[in-house]
Image (cartoon, rainbow, N blue to C red):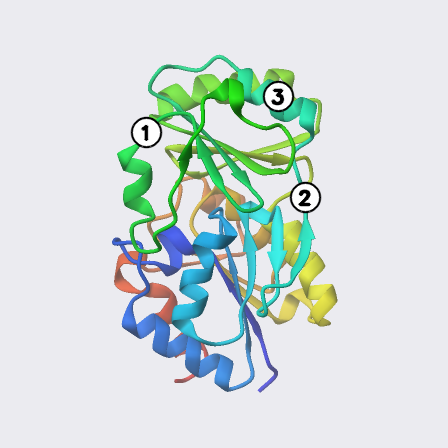
Amino acid sequence: MTPRLIVSDLDGTLLGRDHRLHEDTIEVLRTLVNQGHLLVLASGRHYADMRVFRDQLNVPIHLISSNGAYTHDPNDQLLAAYHVGSPQAAALIKLPRPDNVRLSLYLDDAWYIDAESPSHLEMHAATGFVYQVVPPEKMPTEGIGKVLYGGRPDALLKVETAIREINDGSLHVTYSTSDSLEIMAGGVNKGVALSALLKRLSVAPEDCLAFGDNLNDVEMLSLVGEPHFMINSHPEMAGRLNAARQIGHHGEAAVAVLLRERFAL
């Protein structure tokens, strides 16, 4: 069998409801890598946050983090980094927003947030990746891979509308979940990052399987030969991915189920 490259989102896709890897998922992915297939994890999470899952799997894995802003090889070598422009970062930090919306910055090696947020910590409890509280007026405008706003969908819609009104194409705006509005530099997304990595690895897009569940996965899923989206996906995913296959729920290790079927494990 021709070796394949398997790329998957994490939250809502590969991870369970508890934001952890299921035992079946670990077993299947290890087996496939040991058979000669390649594995990539592509997430909106910070690189330091993603390494925990890579280390748990204990096989060579490339990591695409912060929605494509960073790409690392299995030996932690940084292959690519793209930052939000300083003027754009400054405008996003100063952008008026509802009081219940939290502002975060993903830097190369840190996570800054404008105020304490227990809900943000809950999602990262499995990895121990924690934020530093930094007032907006003291936040940097250089070296930012991703700006994100966390809050209720109706409040985020107001922020998104304001961002799109000032966006001149120098920003890429998307969602990783309904309560996480995420902004990278223009042209930065998981699909672009994966395309560059495929060229580096000499793998054709048609030899890739990809899995995702939200709008920040659309470009990645549109690139590959075998795209899949979860039954728990954002409601717009089916309409944006006509050629993709819908599979089961992330809480039931559906990616592992599909991979067992696909590779006759």
**In the image, is 227 to the left or to the right of 253?**
right
Looking at the image, is 125 positioned above or below residue 137?
below
**In the image, is 251 to the left or to the right of 115?**
left
**In the image, is 158 to the left or to the right of 23?**
right
Q: Within 10 Å of the Cα at label 1, are there few (<14), some (14-19), or many (20+) other Cα atoms?
A: few
Quick one: quadrant of the C terminus?
bottom left
Percent x, y of residue 91:
61, 18
Percent x, y of residue 239:
49, 43
Residue 82 shows which numbered tag? Answer: 2
Residue under pointer 1 = 116
Estimate the spatial distance between the alpha carbons at disc 1 and disc 3, rounded to whole Å. Answer: 21 Å
Residue under pointer 3 = 90
Which of the two discs, 1 and 3, labels the residue nearer the N terminus? 3
| SS at badge 3 | helix
- Inspect the image, locate mark 2, and give the three-letter code of the amino acid beneath it: Tyr
Estimate the spatial distance between the alpha carbons at disc 3 and disc 2, rounded to whole Å. Answer: 16 Å
Q: Decide if residue 230 is in sight here.
A: no
Q: How many tags in the picture?
A: 3
| SS at badge 1 | loop
Residue in the image at 60% along x and 64% along y? 225
- Inspect the image, locate mark 3, and give the three-letter code of the amino acid beneath it: Ala
Q: Decide if residue 25 is in sight here.
A: yes
